[in-house]
Amino acid sequence: MSFCLRLKVKMAWRRTLHLFLVLCASLIGSQIFIQSTEATSENFLDGSNSLRLLQGSWSAGRQEILISPFGIKISNPATQVVMILPPPYSEVHAYNSRTKRLFHVPLNKFVSPYATSMATIKGVTFTELKLNKMRALTYKGCSAEQWVLSKAASERQQALRARGEIFRASPKTFEMLTSTKIPVNKQAIHFVCVYYALPDATGLPLAASYYNMINTHHHYLTTAKISAANATAKDYALPTNFKKADSISDLVLSGQSDDGMKLILMDH
């Protein structure tokens, strides 16, 4: 092979090597960028003002929660009951699309349609529990805080059980996760807590679980998904031709005996 040919081959090999190294650097840089983006977007829902949550509750069943500047809206597909708390967050509007009935009540008089039956039949109440903040974490794409029943409070629960003052289904331990960076009005958070019959929280409830007195674990509230939403005023519009209901229970109960028994026994 002549000297000129060897030089051309050597130069071509160097150009190929250079292109290969450039490509590798590009790929590595892209991977670093992707990893960095994923790391910084771990809590990508923080600060969002319009969100849709899909939740499941032992007491209320499956819910869709819509949060936006127009207020908060809870829709139950099984009962077809919708509850809306619009600004200035002082009055709850509830209606049933199936029975065509509508009910209004001030927030300070709103009661959970499930709390009474839970306390009477299941012997479970959460509203009086005092929780302590444990740690910050990430849950379903947003910042959250873990709140738990303290050891001293758990011991008080067990003492009450020993004296026969609470049922064995009562919580011995309790844990709740709440959102911390989703901008939700405090009154709206209170509304959700009352609806689920949970202790008042500093953030929007996302999950709740507990062990009862016989150490059975229960997932009381779960969130399957949180996603961004494009809410409009139409999503919060109230029906105009529904008959007035006398109470929240009139909306939840269909009038059928099996439906009433399901509510009483919490068999969702």
Image (cartoon, helix red, strand yellow):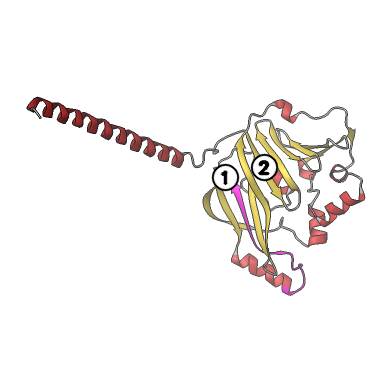
Residue on which the image places disc 2 = 54
Q: Provide residue 185's location: percent of width, then percent of height.
A: 64, 38
Q: Is residue 25 left or right of residue 164?
A: left
The segment highlighted magenta reads 162-179
Badge 1: residue crowd in 10 Å (few <14, some 14–19, many ≥20): some
Q: Is residue 77 left or right of residue 227?
A: right
Residue 168 among magenta residues? yes
Which residue is at a point 55% across and 41% down the rendered structure image?
A: 181
Q: Provide residue 26's location: percent of width, then percent of height.
A: 33, 33
Towards the viewer: 22 or 239: 22
Question: Marks 2 and 1, Cα distance to the nearest angstrom?
Answer: 11 Å
Mark 2 lies on a secondary structure that is: strand
* Residue 64 position by quadrant: top right
Which residue is at a point 83% across and 60% down the rendered structure image?
A: 120
Q: Is residue 91 visible?
A: no
Residue 109 among magenta residues? no
